[in-house]
Amino acid sequence: MGARGSHRIRLWQGPDHLLFVSSSLLGERYKRFYFADIQAIVIRKTAAWLGWIIALLVMTAIFGLAGVGISETAGRIVMFCIAGVFFLILAIHAALGPTCYCMIRTAVQTEELPSLKRVRNADKVVARIRPLIEIAQRQEIRETQTPT
Amino acid sequence: MVNEQVLLCPKCRVALPDALYNQGAFAPCPNCGSAVRCEVFPALYAGPRLGRPGELLVDASEASCFFHPEKKAAVACDSCGRFLCALCDLDFSDRHICPSCLAAGRKKGALGNLDHFRLSWSGMALLLSTVPLLAYPISCVTAPAAIVVALIGLRKPPSLTGRRRVVTMVLALTFALAEIGAWIWFGRSIIKFYIGA
């Protein structure tokens, strides 16, 4: 799942296509990428993962140090709790793995896939649809070569 | 139409060399150095798909295409049964359909695979029941409208993914019923006030 503006983007697997669903409160817009038409999927690692790790580390450190510096027990607990929340977010973010930008290309369009923003997810999706794409395109080639 | 057989780096928009294709791992873009992975499929190298021309009718006893009487029929439409030549035969979701059935199906919304937008009736109902809270006098109209829209939505097909927005629907109905209740209470209070006076 990803987002583009106020729209939530999801990718669904159909029997012979990938369904790109962009949903808002008022409705859903669909784009279909047929396995037989997909030419390429390009994944680029982005620096957002590292950037967020650094930012969250800094926030954890700031609130942690503030907690150490405060002499009042209540204030110290509050600061450590805030530092703890940042650390938790940091741990989850780090565990989810590197971020990426993913795009899919067909003969008529190139579309960004915002729902695939983690390398791990993108790898999983590629591993899942690659055989389906290859089967569909092999069949397509066979059909075009068969004399009618 | 994208007909070049090269892929561009998503960051610097410079063509990526073939050596980076299907490596199964990330490799640096020669121009910007960002780590990219290219999964390339045979369709990249295949040319544009051309439609098959219909065969000319040579014998008068042969069946001819409904739309092109001079062409030999290759298949019957799975929807209306008309004979079609190879040109008119549209392969659609493993079915053979003629252009007029395809157009009619699209118009009626009968072909789910052609849908590119579906209205969220529950979302509309939620908007109708919540947005007027900012201008509450109009809620006497929009609250019943929200209930009507929500009820219409129950009869409409759900999202193509099969999901129905049940939570949104329940929220919309709750807000709308609460607003109607508030209006009833307000009306009764006014009547009581005047009768009491």
Image (cartoon, rainbow, N blue to C red):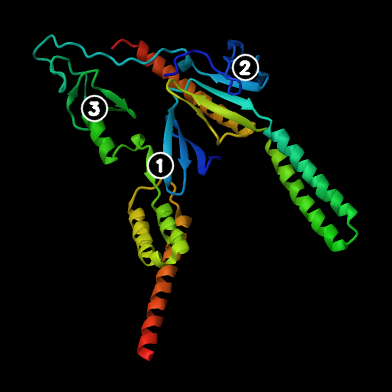
Q: Residue at x 71, y 38 (%)?
A: A52
Residue B170 seen in render: no
From the image, tell me which residue sits under label 1: B160
Q: Nearer the viewer, residue A88 or B134?
A: B134
The three-letter code of the residue at mark 3 reads Pro
Q: Give the CA distance from mark 3 to mark 1.
A: 24 Å
Q: Are marks 3 and 1 in contact (CB under 8 Å)?
A: no
Secondary structure at numbered mark 3: helix
The three-letter code of the residue at mark 1 reads Leu
Mark 3 surroundings: few (<14), some (14-19) or many (≥20) residues within 10 A: some
Q: Residue at x 85, y 52 (%)?
A: A66
Which quadrant: the C terminus of chain B? bottom left
Residue B29 horizontal side relative to residue A58, left or right: left
> Disc 2 or disc 3, which is closer to the eye?
3
From the image, tell me which residue sits under label 2: B23
Task: Give the mark, 2 or 3, whose residue is nearer the N terminus.
Answer: 2
